[in-house]
Image: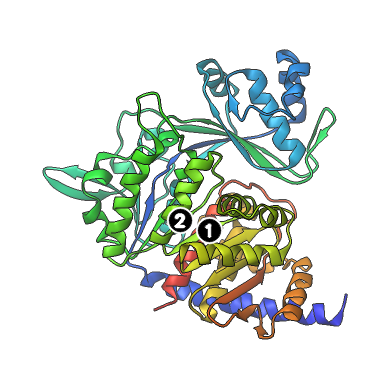
Amino acid sequence: MKESFKEKIRLWKDLYIRAFENATSALPRVRGVLLAYNTNIDAIRYLDKEDLERRIEQIDKEKVFSLIDSPPERITSLEELFGGILRSIKLGKAMEWFVESEEVREYLKEWGWDELRIGGQAGIMANLLGGVYRIPTIVHVPQNPKLQADLFVDGPIFVPIFENNELKLVHPKEAVMTEEELIHYIYEFPRGFQVFDVQAPRENRFIANADDYNARVYMRKEFREYFKGIAEKVDLAVISGLQVLKEYYPDGTTYKDVLEKVESQLNILNRLNVKSHFEFAYTANEKVREALIGMLPKFTSVGLNEVELSSVVQIIGDESLAKEVLEGNVFSVIDAMNLLMDETGIERIHFHTYGYYIELTQYRGERIRDALLFAALAAAAKAMYGNLENLSQVRNALSVPTNERAFIIEEELEKEFAEVENGIIDMTDRQLTFIPTKIVASPKSTVGIGDTISSSAFVSEFAMRG
């Protein structure tokens, strides 16, 4: 190992320790966080080779395999279900397809699960921010059946209800209703998992989405009619779940009808000076993606990975840069982030990928780096334990090795930019912040890691503003 690498390991270890202390001491300063719009039930099954091969043989192995390289990206048959699972395994990529068939939905329910967790970006973040960080958190739930409500952990987690002409905030367990269960069936596989001759290059999951409410970004009456009263109780907001929008719906409505409501709520947040973050999950429909990019100026912050950043740059119109981002070139990523900031004027762009995070901001400070390091610890802890329950688990992630491969990227940045200090780069009118993350060799689960990263970084950074 090069001496410089040994020095970097010591340096980043010290920075990680200090970041954990700074972030955790600042979290209690946050008065409240609003999370919208997608909450559901995650039914997780850890794939078993023999079980999966048997089920594929029972259906039609040849037909299933024919769908791996010509994906329908929706599920209307069992062949498409298993074709999607095998495609996800083959590429080692997370995928989510909507289940349109009632027969398949019944099959999924009978297949069962190994464990249930709260799901949806908003739901996952609620259990983290409210349950682990103990920040008062108001979360939107399209439906709240008992099966889902029981998955919310104890802590300052609230859903709004309207009772006797008064808006009240109660824990989800106190607001149970007889409503439809919104289930996302998640099939996890580890790196090296093999079924027939298909082998996973890395760990990931396939999601069969059997949830009609979040698929339309359904908003409860409380959020539609009393949003201002809810927003007055928080300092920060994280918006997610808009990636599922379709161009048209059978009842004649379009994605524009939903985004009009979202935009009116963003206007209220901005009038109240509530800082807002948009979690930009991959959006297949190009018209919806373009509309979401058009809304970014109303947000304080956006979070995305290489697939999402590439898809945004493609809409902006730079096809070659979009391709380079997907190929993993760090300077192309930085160029794309600058392009997105130029186009939208957004204050903060948080890019996360396997091994490192980068943040571009129109403001400066070490707290930006501290927040990214804290988020990396939270992500590592999530990978280690599968489910986070307390801050001591996040602290335990300090023992996870820092990704040494990212040191090579850091050295490339140091050669390219004149002023680089421990991951902080002065770009005259902007600050670029780079950190190497921690890599868990055999993660227990990958579900919710991206949501853990983005919400931890955003909330802790603004908490440390004081």
Which quadrant would residue 56 be assigned to in this image?
top right
SS class, disc 1? strand
Q: Which residue is mark 2?
A: 278
User: Of 291 and 103, which appears nearest the observer?
Assistant: 291
Q: Are marks 1 and 2 in contact (CB under 8 Å)?
A: yes
The residue nearer to you, when weighing 338 against 400, is 338
Image x and y of residue 159, in percent: 30, 47
Residue extending furthest left?
A: 165
Q: Is residue 332 something one can see in this rendering?
A: yes
Where is residue 207? Give x, y as percent: 59, 35
Q: Which mark is residue 303?
A: 1
Task: Give the quarter of the figure containing the N terminus.
Answer: bottom right
Quadrant of the image occupied by residue 109:
top right
Residue at the (74%, 17%) spot, across then down: 63
Position of residue 444 measured from the top left corner of the image (x, y, whole percent): 66, 48
In the image, what residue type sits under mark 2?
A: Phe
| Mark 1 closeness class: few <14, some 14–19, many ≥20 residues within 10 Å | many
Q: Amino acid at mark 1?
A: Gly
CA gap, disc 1 to disc 2?
A: 6 Å
Residue 394 visible in image: no
Under circle 2, the secondary element is strand
Question: Residue lying farthest right?
Answer: 1
Using a 10 Å C-alpha cutoff, classify the residue at mark 2 as few (fewer than 14 neighbours), some (14 to 19) or many (20 or more). many
**Residue at horizontal 31 percent and vertical 63 percent from the top:** 270
- The quarter of the picture where the C terminus appears is bottom left
The image position of residue 361, as x and y in percent, is: 52, 72
Looking at the image, is 348 positioned above or below residue 144?
below
The label on residue 314 is none
Q: Residue at x 69, y 33 (%)?
A: 47
